[in-house]
Image (spheres, grey):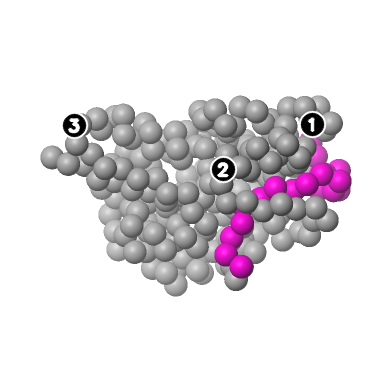
Amino acid sequence: METRFAISGQHYLFDVQSFAHTILAEGGTSFHYALYDRTTRGLMDDVAQSVSEVGVLMQTSKTKPELDAALEQAGLTFCELAASAPQVALPKSHPLVNAASLNLEQLADYPYIHFAQEPDAPVAFAEEALADIARAKSVACTDRATLTELIMALNGYTVTSGILVGITDGSALTTIPLETDVVLHLGYITREDAQLSELGSRFVDHLAKSLTLYAKS
């Protein structure tokens, strides 16, 4: 019997690892899987339209009310798997790499690299915590590998969950705690009227274990 399963997510590393685990655990001689890296609106549309069964999403303590309202309007629901403190991701050769923690004032002279959203997307749809704070130097991109390359090439930084485990394109970066009271809420979205399939449950279970293991408090 042919197997089909698809997820969508913001530009993470940890969901790739869990997705690969799901494929390997299922096995089979005939299958069609898909993992789509999307903008926040894009992954919401994918799940709402059943292009993907699950959408991996990050909220922050500041963006949660607006995101929850947008999800409800789209007929979607968010399930939190782990909470994490925001981390600054920067090159291992960066001048600030030995700091015990960092604040945005210390980072002001360095380019802020982030994922672009649609031009009309609200700030709450950003994939990075504290995206509402203006930066003098910023560079937007749409691809995870490109983000890493730009951080390396420009001696820049981004704000992330800090979970870079399992995928090689995170190995060139290191993370340092960001001084903020904002909390990241990591989880997934599904349609309100949908029940997870066996593959969906397997993916979510592995994702929950991974996030619990590696989330930084």
Task: Give 75 or 92, whichever is nearer the viewer.
Answer: 92
Task: Give 134 or 145, whichever is nearer the viewer.
Answer: 145
Cβ–Cβ under 8 Å for marks 1 and 2 = no
- Earlier in the chain: of badge 1 and badge 3, it is 3
Mark 1 vs mark 2, CA separation in Å: 20 Å
Residue wearing tag 2: 144
**112 part of magenta stretch:** yes
Residue 42 lies, in percent from the top left, at: 47, 60
Picture residue at 73% right of the left edge, 27% below the top: 92
- Disc sitting over residue 23 in the figure: none
- The amino acid type of the residue labelled 3 equals Thr
143 to 193, vertically: above or below:
above
Residue 4 lies, in percent from the top left, at: 25, 45
Q: Residues within 10 Å of mark 2 (few under 14, many from 20)?
A: some
Is residue 100 at least partly visible in the picture? no
Q: Residues within 10 Å of mark 1 (few under 14, many from 20)?
A: some
Picture residue at 67% right of the left edge, 31% below the top: 173
- Earlier in the chain: of badge 3 and badge 2, it is 3
- Disc sitting over residue 94 in the figure: 1
Mark 1 vs mark 3, CA separation in Å: 46 Å
- The amino acid type of the residue labelled 1 equals His
- The amino acid type of the residue labelled 2 equals Arg
- Disc sitting over residue 29 in the figure: 3
Is residue 132 at least partly visible in the picture? yes
- Earlier in the chain: of badge 1 and badge 2, it is 1
**On-image quarter of the N terminus:** top left
Mark 3 vs mark 2, CA separation in Å: 30 Å
Q: Residues within 10 Å of mark 3 (few under 14, many from 20)?
A: few
Range of magenta residues: 101-119
197 to 134, vertically: above or below:
above
Main secondary structure along the magenta-highlighted residues: loop
